[in-house]
Image (tube, rainbow, N blue to C red):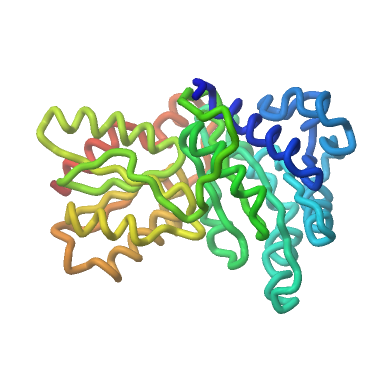
């Protein structure tokens, strides 16, 4: 085991898969010479060459379109979309082509591609570079949606994503890139669709994604000092969603709070809340409660941005309101 950042864990996963399978290639804006806008792909072009770690023009539609074509013809591309906000200009390539080819060709076509991208607020990057858009991808059948919260999860899930024969959107929170954790040095996989119980508890289930997992763990530690025992479930992937683990937890604790950074309206938290309401209603002792961002663009002002993002204080207040 080594202690490494989430950024280093992703880099290690990419390196191991490039070494293992000659069909794997990376492409995207600045992924090669500059090592990616967040430095995640640093050193990979020098090791594997420009053919397998390819810098592209600033044309997101071409990057995702090239990945779709490469995947269908037998390669395993990992395309980096610099910021998730830029998906707007590549929606057709991802939503109408990658997501639907297997279905439209009767299962004969495979699209083994990964779209890596960073998301989330906290860096003062303003409204066009800070969104959490996981609900957009969740809504499209044919796409898997992965959101790691730790370096360990990031490495294992990315290796699984690269080996998957379906398109995977791999969402990396930019504020987690420099978070540390223990990670095995060797290659390993974590099945996509398996949630992880990050903390066991008996009084309330708190489902959290991405950066919110760490906030939830800190909030749970403070709540335990007041006698409130919170169980924290990290879905790790939103599509497929591990409903069984969430439902099992809710049936034990009888309360649910869902915490996500995305705009709360029509977000992934709404899907999780509805699922529990439909399948575990008789086990609930309180209304299912969501905590997310307000329905507005993300402000540039650091004070307003800080207020926009759910935090430990808001989590504690929400938990207490339904206990």
Q: Residue furthest right?
A: 51
Which of 127 and 180 lies nearest the eye of the viewer?
180
The answer to whether residue 259 of the structure is visible from this angle is no
Q: Position of residue 194 (x, y in %)?
A: 44, 53
Number of numbered labels in the structure image? 0
Q: Residue furthest top?
A: 3
Left of 87 or right of it: where is 194? left
Which of 268 and 112 lies nearest the eye of the viewer?
112
Residue, x 67% and y 59% (percent of image)? 165
The answer to whether residue 289 of the structure is visible from this angle is yes
Q: Position of residue 272 (x, y in %)?
A: 37, 59
Q: Is residue 267 above or below residue 19?
A: below
Left of 214 or right of it: where is 125? right
Residue, x 53% and y 22% (percent of image)? 4
Which of 28 and 286 lies nearest the eye of the viewer?
28
Q: Is residue 193 above or below residue 80?
A: below
Which of 165 and 89 lies nearest the eye of the viewer?
165
Residue, x 80% and y 41% (percent of image)? 27
Q: Position of residue 178 (x, y in %)?
A: 53, 23
Left of 36 or right of it: where is 159? left
Residue, x 54% and y 24% (percent of image)? 5
**Snapshot quadrant of residue 32:** top right
Q: Is residue 184 above or below residue 17?
A: above
């Amino acid at each position: 085991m080594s202690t490494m950042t989430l950024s280093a864990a992703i880099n290690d996963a990419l390196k191991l898969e490039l070494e293992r399978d000659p069909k794997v290639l990376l492409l995207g804006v600045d992924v090669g010479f500059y090592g990616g806008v967040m430095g995640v792909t640093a050193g990979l072009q020098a090791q594997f060459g420009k053919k397998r770690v390819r810098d592209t023009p600033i044309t997101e539609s071409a990057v995702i379109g090239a990945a779709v074509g490469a995947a269908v013809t037998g390669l395993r591309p990992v395309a980096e979309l610099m910021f998730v906000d830029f998906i707007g200009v590549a929606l057709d390539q991802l939503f109408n082509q990658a997501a639907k080819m297997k279905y439209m060709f009767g299962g004969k076509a495979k699209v083994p591609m990964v779209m890596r991208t960073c998301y989330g607020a906290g860096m003062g990057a303003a409204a066009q570079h800070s969104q959490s858009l996981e609900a957009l991808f969740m809504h499209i059948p044919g796409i898997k949606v992965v959101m790691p919260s730790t370096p360990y999860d990031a490495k294992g899930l990315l290796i699984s994503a690269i080996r998957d024969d379906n398109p995977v959107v791999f969402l990396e929170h930019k504020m987690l890139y420099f978070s540390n954790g223990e990670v095995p040095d060797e290659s390993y996989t974590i099945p996509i669709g398996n949630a992880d119980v990050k903390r066991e508890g008996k009084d309330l289930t708190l489902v959290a994604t991405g950066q919110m997992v760490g906030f939830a763990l800190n909030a749970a530690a403070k709540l335990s000092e007041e006698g409130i025992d919170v169980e924290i479930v990290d879905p790790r992937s939103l599509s497929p969603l591990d409903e069984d683990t969430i439902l099992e937890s809710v049936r034990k604790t009888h309360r649910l709070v869902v915490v996500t950074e995305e705009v709360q309206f029509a977000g992934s938290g709404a899907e999780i809340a509805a699922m529990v309401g439909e399948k575990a209603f008789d086990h609930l002792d309180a209304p299912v409660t969501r905590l997310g961002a307000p329905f507005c663009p993300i402000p540039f002002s650091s004070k307003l941005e800080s207020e926009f993002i759910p935090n430990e204080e808001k989590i504690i207040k929400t938990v207490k309101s339904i206990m």
